[in-house]
Image (tube, grey):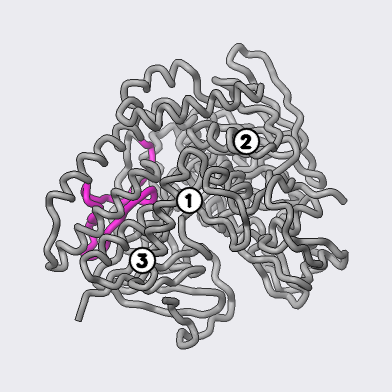
Amino acid sequence: MSGRFVRVAEKGRRTFEIVIDGRRALAAAGDTLMVALLTSQQDLRDSEFGDGRRAGFCVMGACQDCWVWTEDGERVRACTTPAVEGMSIVTRLSQAGEGVWPRL
Amino acid sequence: MAATVIVIGAGPAGVRAAEALVEAGLRPVVIDEGRRDGGQIYRRQPEGFTRTYDALYGTEAERARALHEAFDALRPNIDYVPDTLVWNVAPNSVHMVSGTRHRELGFDALIVCSGATDRLMPVPGWHHAGTYSLGGAQVALKSQGCAIGSRVVMMGTGPLLYLVAAQYVKAGATVSAVLDTSTFAQRLRALPQLLAIPSTLKKGIALMKVLKDARVPVHRGITPVEIRGTPEHGVQGVRVKLADGAMLEVECDAVALGYHLRSETQLADLAGCEFRFDQALQQWLPVADEDGRSNVKGVYLAGDGARVRGADAAERAGRLAALAAMKDIGMISNEDEANKLRIQLGRFTRFAAGLRAAFPWPARFAATLPDETIVCRCEAISAGELRRVVNDMGAKEANRAKAFSRVGMGRCQGRFCAHAGAEVIAAEARVPLEAVGRLRGQAPVKPLPMALAPHQDMETSE
């Protein structure tokens, strides 16, 4: 799957693996989680209100439209969280643990 | 004991405020949400990134460098608390959280330099993956070396529209079109006010040349019709009506959208500051005198968070607010410097008025948004639903309409929907925007982790 974000600078960085929905992907040292996710796929979460996939919006911690889950159920804001080697991220609402998200 | 002064924000206003306090012998606490100083405009790239100041900040390279160096020099003399959200302001104390660690800190004076975010007007399809705010598109490039897509359309209006487009072009990203809702005639009429700061006007003209040289199509006086896309695959194109009435469709996989900036005023609200409707801005802003004093004793407001006038003005406003705070707590004040700063700020105020006239907020679009357009991105609430609560439930006031429709109740707490939502209500109820009122600020100003630990393990860094 190709990414949404395009790296146009700082391309020589050390890379490491993370896991997105059970699939391995490469991130670069200094990436935010948002960039690590969106350079390997098109989106990073489901809207809870049925209008489709989302890929963040404000990129500065204000809109909260880039929340994803770690595999153990912790909720993190992808645009302000650094990507760390070995992270395992869940982007599908259906895969996130029941009760992790407020279901309205 | 020396007074405790807290500065919130380490952007241009916050850094210069802290600098003035340190010069006077105080040791301020500087609390910032960012991992590094600089704010949004002079945001520093992560450690280990190698782009030069010229590459990162273009014409603003020297200002960015000066601000970063000033902050580095301050570090031994301030208590710097990065990566920390101030989520509430109580009388004479702030509540902050870093990760899951919580702490309360008292103050004698509080200088709020909370900055600004993009001002948004919805357009059908703006909820599709691949639509970003213009500021967000800039952060992706500046801080992470990424373009938001492989073919990007920049749409909206304001100085950021052209700045971000030019920065993308220079970085080698593909800008498929720049679509501006304001017209060249509006720009010309604003010229006398824009001449208040000729150097900035000149930089703006240079940006246009970058786009022209790169043969980026630029259309002015457009009306956005739709961001085309699908729920599964996101953005596929943009459809607009051109000034001559013809329809234009541009294929793209990302859109950067924004209509200038809006002040982040939640903390001023929680501090109890009085708000007034600014007719020129058509926005509710906290009341402050020209030095940044609010109506709440000990609370000062500076930079774009108080009034959007740009980074150069923010540096001066930050310093001026610090001088005012020190004067009010009985320290010797430098009236000569304060006077100079006030005169300089006057020019920035005129320039900001020029920018508003050159790139006006397109309030008229709110009335004609199709009912199915999502206004609240957080909870996917449509313009039609908002109109329904106005008509069926008589909710013509912002907080009442929020209670019924939930527009403004989502995770962004109205940052990206409140202004346009109020315009939709005003148009539907046929009342002036001012009569709709404003959404009351609520703590926490951003969502908090569910489990918070007490403060003892949260340390300030030297």
- Graded by Cα atoms within 10 Å as few (under 14), some (14 to 19) or many (20 or more), the crowding at tag 1 reads many
- Graded by Cα atoms within 10 Å as few (under 14), some (14 to 19) or many (20 or more), the crowding at tag 2 reads some
Query: Are circles 2 and 3 on residues that touch, CB within 8 Å?
Result: no
Identify the residue at horizontal 58%, vertical 80% (top origin): B451
Looking at the rendered image, the disc whose residue lies closer to the viewer, 3 or 1, is 3
Closest to the observer: B164 or B85?
B164
B176 displayed left or right of B306: right
Q: Closer to the N terminus: mark 3 or mark 1?
A: 1
**Which residue lies under the disc numbered 2?**
B170
Question: Disc 2 to disc 3, how far (Cα)?
Answer: 33 Å
Quarter of the image for the N terminus of chain B: give it: bottom left
**Which residue lies under the disc numbered 3?**
B74
Closest to the observer: B341 or A63?
B341
Question: Disc 3 to disc 1, how far (Cα)?
Answer: 17 Å
B118 displayed left or right of A5: left
* Residue A67 appears in view: no
Number of marks in the rendered image: 3
Q: Furthest-top residue in view?
A: B244
Find numbered disc 3 in the image and state the secondary structure of the residue it sits on.
helix
Question: Disc 1 to disc 2, how far (Cα)?
Answer: 18 Å
Q: Chain of mark 2?
A: B
